Image (tube, helix red, strand yellow):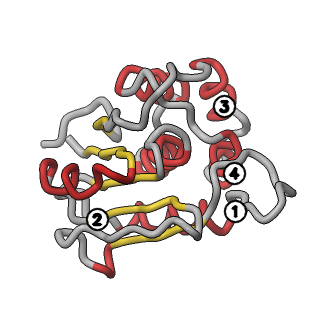
């Protein structure tokens, strides 16, 4: 089964090794330093600088933009899917779950958005996908508001301490 591993920053090396990930998307604030795990090749790592905010105009913070989400979709399209894709942000609760939803939907566009959102909630009771990333992804993937509605329907996740990585299957169907 094609899987996405969603992780907080401090567990990325452990999750990459444990799950055999060879490709990674990082959604980080520009000032947050970190080291790419050695098992992830530099050319298979997408680093998107953005803060975990839902709207523009918040001082010096960088809001997620259309260009970020386009890069995410393009990177996911080039993922070879033989090993899991690792997606992380600071806590693994907001930006990275939103990115996982968009990656999964871009790879398997025939999925029902509500079923996808419920699968995310089942995989992570703590996930609260970043609303701005979801909204941009909804537009770029031409979901006509259905992804936004589905994420709103699952609501805010449980409080999290940033220690709850999870595995998110891209679809419910098993590979070959």
What's the CA distance linking mark 3 and mark 1?
Answer: 18 Å
Few, some or many residues within 10 Å of mark 2 (<14, 14–19, 20+): many
Residue at the image position 27 percent from the left and 44 percent from the top: 3
What's the CA distance linking mark 4 and mark 2?
Answer: 23 Å
Whether residues under marks 4 and 1 lie with C-beta atoms below 8 angstroms apart, the answer is yes
Please provide percent x and percent y for residue 25. 41, 62
Identify the residue position indicated by label 3 in the image. 146
What's the CA distance linking mark 3 and mark 4?
Answer: 12 Å
Identify the residue position indicated by label 4 in the image. 136
Up the image or down, 105 lies above or below 44; here it is: above
Residue at the image position 14 percent from the left and 56 percent from the top: 17
Residue that protrudes farthest toward the bottom in the picture: 43
Whether residues under marks 2 and 1 lie with C-beta atoms below 8 angstroms apart, the answer is no
- Earlier in the chain: of badge 3 and badge 4, it is 4
- Residue 66 shows which numbered tag? 1
- Residue 23 shows which numbered tag? 2
């Amino acid at each position: 089964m094609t899987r996405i591993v969603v992780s907080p920053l401090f567990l990325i090396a452990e999750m990459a090794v444990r799950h055999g990930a060879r490709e990674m998307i990082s959604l980080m604030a520009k000032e947050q330093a970190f080291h790419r795990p050695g098992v992830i090749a530099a050319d298979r790592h997408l680093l998107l600088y953005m803060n975990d905010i839902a709207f523009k105009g918040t001082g010096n913070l960088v809001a997620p933009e259309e260009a970020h989400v386009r890069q995410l979709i393009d990177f996911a399209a080039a993922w070879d899917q033989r090993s899991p894709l690792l997606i992380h942000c600071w806590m693994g609760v907001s930006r990275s779950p939103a990115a996982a939803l968009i990656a999964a939907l871009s790879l398997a566009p025939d999925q029902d958005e509500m079923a996808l959102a419920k699968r995310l909630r089942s995989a992570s009771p703590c996930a609260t996908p970043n609303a701005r990333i979801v909204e941009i992804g909804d537009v770029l993937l031409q979901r006509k508001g259905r992804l936004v509605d589905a994420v709103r329907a699952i609501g805010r996740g449980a409080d999290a301490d940033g220690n709850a990585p999870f595995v998110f299957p891209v679809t419910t169907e098993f590979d070959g």
